[in-house]
Amino acid sequence: MAWNQPGGDGNNQDPWGKKRPNNQNDLDKMIKEAGDKFGKMFGGKGGQGANSGKSFFVIGLVVLVAFYVIKGFYTVKEAEQGVITRFGAYDRTVEPGLGWMPWGIDRLYKVDVNTVKPEYFSGTMLTRNKNIVDVKLSVQYRVSVPEDYLFNVNKPDSVLKHATDAALRKAVGNSNIDEVLKDNKTGIMAMVQEEINKTIGPLEMGITVIEVNLQESEAPAAVREAFDDVNRSINDKKRYEEQARAYENQVIPTAEAEAETMMQAAEAYRQRVIAEAKGEVARFAKLLPEYEAAKEVTRQRLYLETVEQVMSKVSKVILDTEGGSNLTYLPLDQIVNKKKSNKESK
């Protein structure tokens, strides 16, 4: 064959007259041998040829599909909620239980929404009246909206920490030292929680603050002894005030009872004096006609009756020594009896 003679004359020879190798037949032979081997591995016979290759492909496809389906199952625990993204974007939130998602397309994030988590904060802060105080505070919170917690804010726990620190400093800065140490701890905790909610609310972090607890507030170590002295003085003041109130509660009722007794006695005396005065007025009114009829006689009689009444209460005896009598008689028995009767009437 000449050099310029094409090799497609059907003799399958190269320019040197040698037989060309049949590459297509060799490739078919290799595929057939591989198919026979895999067919034997899955229970087939070596002579099945192309049918064995197809069976292997179908089995492999079934295995892959089964693996893909099994891989897509997931379980969300009772205290959790699942957040599923599709191609990186939020798709849905799932409740606890067993579910399925297309593996490789969807991705599951599990978020604990039942556990209350604590965060602790401490620092040295300045009060409204320019005093320094050491404060320790804890915040109890939980995740309420898991998709917001995951995607709305980067590092929401850190944001909560900074918001709490700012709220605490503001609350302490608006209070004096006594309020921070003991007088208004409850009010400060309420102010801190309100400020935290104002800060994180617009951010939609998916966090709910359950409780704020002011665990400890005290003066710095350098001035703690002086503060303790002040506190002791305040406690002494309160104790003395309580003692004074107890004494007041004891004395005032007694004084009020005595005053009431005196008022009643005075009222009785007033009524008695008025009654006596009215009696005297009535007596004089009764004597008035007699006096008008015989003024001199009535005046003398009234004088004598009055003297008799007055002198009957006096333990003295008046003697008329000008009568010229040699015998003086003293009625001692009558004097003694009158004196006794006067004492008994009193």
Image (cartoon, rainbow, N blue to C red):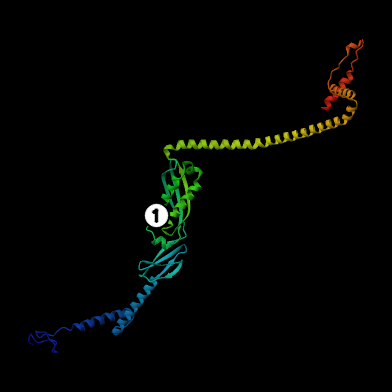
Residue at 34% from the left image edge and 77% from the top image edge: 61
Identify the image quadrant of residue 109: bottom left
> Count of labels shown?
1
Residue at 43% from the left image edge and 65% from the top image edge: 82
Residue at 63% from the left image edge and 36% from the top image edge: 248
Look at the image and tell me in which quarter the C terminus lies.
top right
Q: Is 265 in front, or is 225?
A: 265
Expressed as whole percent of the image width and height from the top left, the position of residue 157 reads: 40, 55
Q: Secondary structure at mark 1?
A: helix
Position of 242 with respect to 318 (left or right) is left
Q: Is residue 84 above or below residue 269?
A: below
Q: Amino acid at mark 1?
A: Val
Q: Is 155 in front, or is 34?
A: 155
State the residue position of label 1.
Answer: 159
Identify the image quadrant of residue 40: bottom left
Q: Is residue 16 above or below residue 116?
A: below
Identify the image quadrant of residue 106: bottom left
Residue at 40% from the left image edge and 52% from the top image edge: 162
Expressed as whole percent of the image width and height from the top left, the position of residue 279 reads: 84, 32
Look at the image and tell me in which quarter the N terminus lies.
bottom left
Expressed as whole percent of the image width and height from the top left, the position of residue 176 reads: 46, 42
Expressed as whole percent of the image width and height from the top left, the position of residue 285 reads: 86, 31
Q: Say few, some or many: other residues with alpha carbon within 10 Å of mark 1 (under 14 / 14 to 19 / 20 or more).
A: some
Q: Is 285 in front, or is 324?
A: 285
**Extreme bottom residue here?**
10
Q: Is residue 316 above or below residue 242?
A: above
**Extreme left residue here?**
2
Q: Is residue 295 above or below residue 133?
A: above
